[in-house]
Image: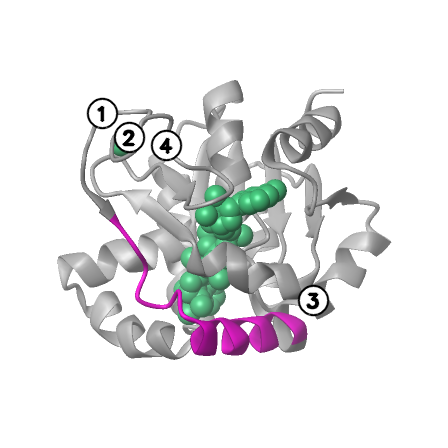
Amino acid sequence: MNIILLGPPGAGKGTQAQRLVDRHGMRQLSTGDMLRGAIKAGTPVGLEAKAVMERGELVSDAIVSALIGDELDAMGPDTGAIFDGYPRTAAQADSLDELLAARGRKLDHVIELEVDEDALVERIVGRFTCATCGKGYHDRFDPPKVEGTCDKCGGHEFKRRPDDNEETVRTRMAEYRAKTAPILPGYEARGLVARVDGMADIEAVSAAIEAIVAP
Ligand code: AP5
Ligand code: MG
Ligand code: ZN
């Protein structure tokens, strides 16, 4: 199965992708996470992406599509893929079709998380992740069960993203409206789009996604 999770910054793509991984053993392909990994590793891609991401603008189509192609090649043919934060432009949507076709894969669902933009800033400024295993949390909406200890790996160190500030979030939302939302009608014409209320609580959103991927 190959699924796209689509929605603006803070919609819950990463949160729901992690849950799909846990439930179905699928693989999360997050271009944002890959780019942050490249920055941390100091690779040429990371050097190019760093300032662009700090401004909240989009990294070049060629870079992100190459990252996705490499990840697809590294996974078994039977492992399902969850595309999180990719594609984000019409050119990326075309590239994804080619990347999948070349590997005998096809898109099953494009799940749009519908959210109210005003709530997203609060979600994003309250977000943090485990520095050891990467599990995502929120100060108010999804805190660790024991304060200061990761539920998943027991780690005690957490981190916040440098682009998770109000100003950058506004740019990221504008980029979403201008470049990413316009790819939806094409998927709709192919009968692939399912909409989920992303304003519901995390469990309810997971249940709605579950009803789409494993009816
Ligand atoms: P990326 O990392 O993809 O960030 P994004 O799209 O801005 O999305 P986020 O990760 O901020 O949000 P999310 O939907 O994953 O929300 P989450 O689940 O964490 O991209 C970052 C940057 O990289 C881009 O700006 C760009 O520069 C570059 N980039 C990446 N991909 C690219 C591409 N394809 N092309 C070009 N450039 C690219 O949830 C947020 C918080 O809310 C969490 O704390 C969570 O606990 C909480 N939460 C989640 N769901 C709920 C809920 N239902 N109720 C209450 N709280 C909730
Ligand atoms: Mg994310
Ligand atoms: Zn952890």
Q: Is the distance from the Cβ of mark 1 to the nearest ligand 3 atom less than 8 Å?
A: yes
The answer to which of marks 1 and 4 sits earlier in the sequence is: 4
Query: Taking 7 as reference, is 175 above or below it?
Result: below
Three-letter code, disc 1? Gly
Near mark 4 (Cα within 10 A), the count class, few <14, some 14-19 or many ≥20, is some
Do the residues under discs 4 and 3 have CB atoms within 8 angstroms?
Answer: no
- Rendered location of residue 157, percent (x, y): 18, 41
Mark 3, residue position: 181
Q: Report the magenta residues as a range.
A: 159-177
Q: Which mark is residue 150?
A: 2
Q: Quadrant of the C terminus?
A: top right
Q: Secondary structure at mark 1?
A: loop
Mark 4, residue position: 144
* Distance between the alpha carbons at the discs numbered 2 and 4: 6 Å
Do the residues under discs 1 and 2 have CB atoms within 8 angstroms?
Answer: yes
Do the residues under discs 2 and 4 have CB atoms within 8 angstroms?
Answer: yes
Q: Secondary structure at mark 4?
A: loop
Mark 1, residue position: 154
Three-letter code, disc 3? Ala
- In the displayed structure image, the side of residue 26 where residue 158 appears, left or right: left
